[in-house]
Every structure is written in structure tokens, then in C-alpha cells.
Amino acid sequence: MWPLVVLLLLASASCGSAQLILNKTKPVEYTNCNKTVVIPCFVSNVEATTLDDLYLNWKFGNENVLTFVGSQRTSTTGNNFSSASIVPEALLEGTASLKLDKSDAVPGNYTCEVTELSREGEAIIELKYRVVNWFSPNENILIIIFPMLAILLFWGQFGVVSEHSTARSSGLGLIVVPTVILILLQYAAFMIAPAIGMSFFSIAILILQVLGFVLSVVGLRLCILECVALHSPLLISGLGIIALAELLGLVYMKFIASNQRTIQPPRSK
Ligand SMILES: *[C@@H]1O[C@H](CO)[C@@H](O)[C@H](O)[C@H]1NC(C)=O
Ligand SMILES: *[C@@H]1O[C@H](CO)[C@@H](O)[C@H](O)[C@H]1NC(C)=O
Ligand SMILES: *[C@@H]1O[C@H](CO)[C@@H](O)[C@H](O)[C@H]1NC(C)=O
Ligand SMILES: *[C@@H]1O[C@H](CO)[C@@H](O)[C@H](O)[C@H]1NC(C)=O
């Protein structure tokens, strides 16, 4: 007698609520920064207490992404989705979310189809790809302009130096070298130029330049670490400071040079 009652109860339980209810989810986004992509799928009325009763199928259009057969505890993935995975145990709590490597993720509509004995339900979740720009157009302009400005200003100084010294032709190809070399060159310029050397001003300008360089390197490093350039202001201010230091260096050296001329007038012209 008892077994029959239990059977009847079980039958009424599974027929009573014929559908599994899957939560509606908003489209999910991924960017170049996501290593993996999770497409959410939640069932709010799972009653199964063992995976044996559950079956899950993820599809992308007509393509099979992943099939999980609870009674066999096996997941099989579609050809183009070899990285697809789920957490089987989480199914009993109603979580059927799919995890994919970014390389396998294709934007579009994914179907999550869950079956528990005779009940079933499905949900469609849209996966979107969002392009993240590292820098805004304005930031891009600054990032290009500041180093160019710094190099031009440095060349200006070099012009001042070479009026006075023999170190005339060294430093071709400076246009492409990184800004750290500008600092060394700034140092060299101060040393080559007569009557400058390591004065208070030249040291201050060098320190400013090192500071700018550190800021831009730290900014760049943080930008790279965080994938999206949250720290671009740091990078840009670093480059800006380097350019500023070059400007100060140029002004300073022009100033010294003109002072020198008044003392000992130029030989020619
Ligand atoms: C799904 O929806 C139900 C009812 O709307 C809610 O109680 C439950 O917390 C939701 N589950 C998840 C995982 O969002
Ligand atoms: C992508 O990564 C972001 C940030 O870590 C996260 O909030 C988002 O849910 C991820 N997108 C997907 C589809 O997994
Ligand atoms: C896998 O992707 C390729 C192109 O990316 C497509 O031609 C092929 O039909 C896909 N495989 C399946 C099983 O749909
Ligand atoms: C996914 O489905 C939604 C709603 O049905 C639709 O608006 C959207 O265009 C679809 N997305 C793609 C990429 O097919």
C-alpha cells in the first residue's frame, strides 16, 4: 500500500507543476578583457535532489554547445565550443550557467534548456560583445602629441648645445627612442653645455623628468594590468610632465646660452 501512495504523490508532484521556470535574464556583455564568459541560466523551481533526474542542453542557434546528461554525469560539448563547461552540482540549486573561453564565445542568442524528469523549461540569453577603447580620441591625441613635443623640445635644446660644443651629430634617430632615453640625453645635454652642468635648475628639471617617466610607466603598467585603461590620466600626465620638463630645459638652456653670449660674443656671423 505505502509504495503505491508514494508513487501517486511523486506522480502528482511532477505533473502538478508541468513547467520548470527559468529566470528571465538581461543580455550579458563581454569585452576583450573577459578571459572567460559566463552565460547565466537559473531555474527557480528545481525539485530534483539527485543529478540523475536532470538533463541540460545549451544551444547556439542550431549548434550544440553543451549537453549534460545527469544520469551519466557526462557533459559533451559541440565542435566549436570545446571549452564549454557547467558546474553539475550547482544544477540542483537551479544554476545551469554556461562557462566558455572567450575564444569560443560567439555573440548571439544562446538557449538554455533544462529537463527534470517530465518537466522542462528553456530560456534564451543574448550574449553581446562590446568593444572597449583603451583611450578616448582626445587621450590618443595627447599620448601622441606629448612625446613628440618632448622630442621636438629636446631637439631645440640640442640645437642650443651644438652652438657651443662639438657634440653636433650624435643623437640621430632620436625620434623613435623611448622617453627614458630623453632623460639620459637631457642629463648629457646639461653636462655638454658649458656653464650649465649640474645646477639647481638642471637637477630640478631632471627630477621632474624622472617623475614624469615614472608616472607614465606606472600609468601604462596599470592600464595594461586592468585591460581597460582606467589609469590613462596617469599615463597622460606623466607624458605631459616629460614634455613640460623638456620645455623648461629648453627655456633654461636658451637663457644660459644668451647670458653666455653677452659675456663672450659669438665668434662668427
Ligand atoms: C529567479 O527568480 C525568482 C523569482 O522571480 C527569484 O526568487 C530567484 O531569486 C531568482 N533566482 C536567481 C538565481 O536569480
Ligand atoms: C566580463 O567581465 C566583467 C568584468 O569582470 C563581468 O562583469 C562580466 O559579467 C563578464 N561577462 C561575461 C559574459 O561573463
Ligand atoms: C563551426 O564554426 C565554423 C566556422 O567558424 C562553421 O563553418 C561550422 O559550421 C561550425 N560547426 C558547426 C558544427 O556548426
Ligand atoms: C537575439 O534575440 C533577441 C530577441 O529575440 C533579438 O532582438 C536579437 O536581435 C537577437 N540577437 C542576435 C544576435 O541574433
Image: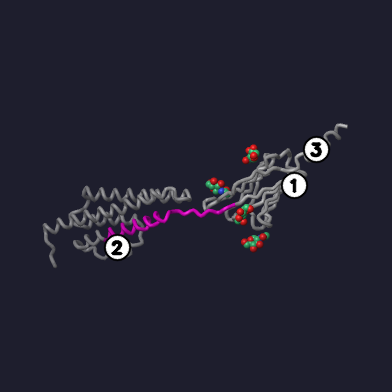
Q: Amino acid at mark 1?
A: Gln
Q: Residues within 10 Å of mark 2 (few under 14, many from 20)?
A: few
What numbered label is drawn on residue 171?
A: 2
Do callouts 3 and 1 mark residues in contact (Cβ within 8 Å)? no
Q: Is residue 148 magenta?
A: yes
Q: Which numbered disc flags the more N-terminal residue, 2 or 1?
A: 1
Q: Which residue is mark 1?
A: 72
Query: Which of label 3 and label 1 is nearer to you?
Result: 3
Q: Is residue 128 magenta?
A: yes
Left or right: where 105 falls relative to 244: right
Q: Residue furthest top?
A: 2
Q: Which residue is mark 3?
A: 12
Q: Residues within 10 Å of mark 3 (few under 14, many from 20)?
A: few
| Residue 198 x %, y % | 22, 50
Left or right: where 15 falls relative to 158: right
Q: Amino acid at mark 2?
A: Gly
| Residue 204 x %, y % | 25, 48
Instruction: Classify mark 2: helix, strand or loop.
Output: loop
Q: CA distance from mark 2 to mark 1?
A: 71 Å
Q: Is residue 20 above or below residue 104?
A: above
Q: Is residue 189 above or below residue 4?
A: below
Q: Amino acid at mark 3?
A: Ser
Residue 184 visible in the snapshot: yes
Q: Which residues are magenta?
A: 127-155
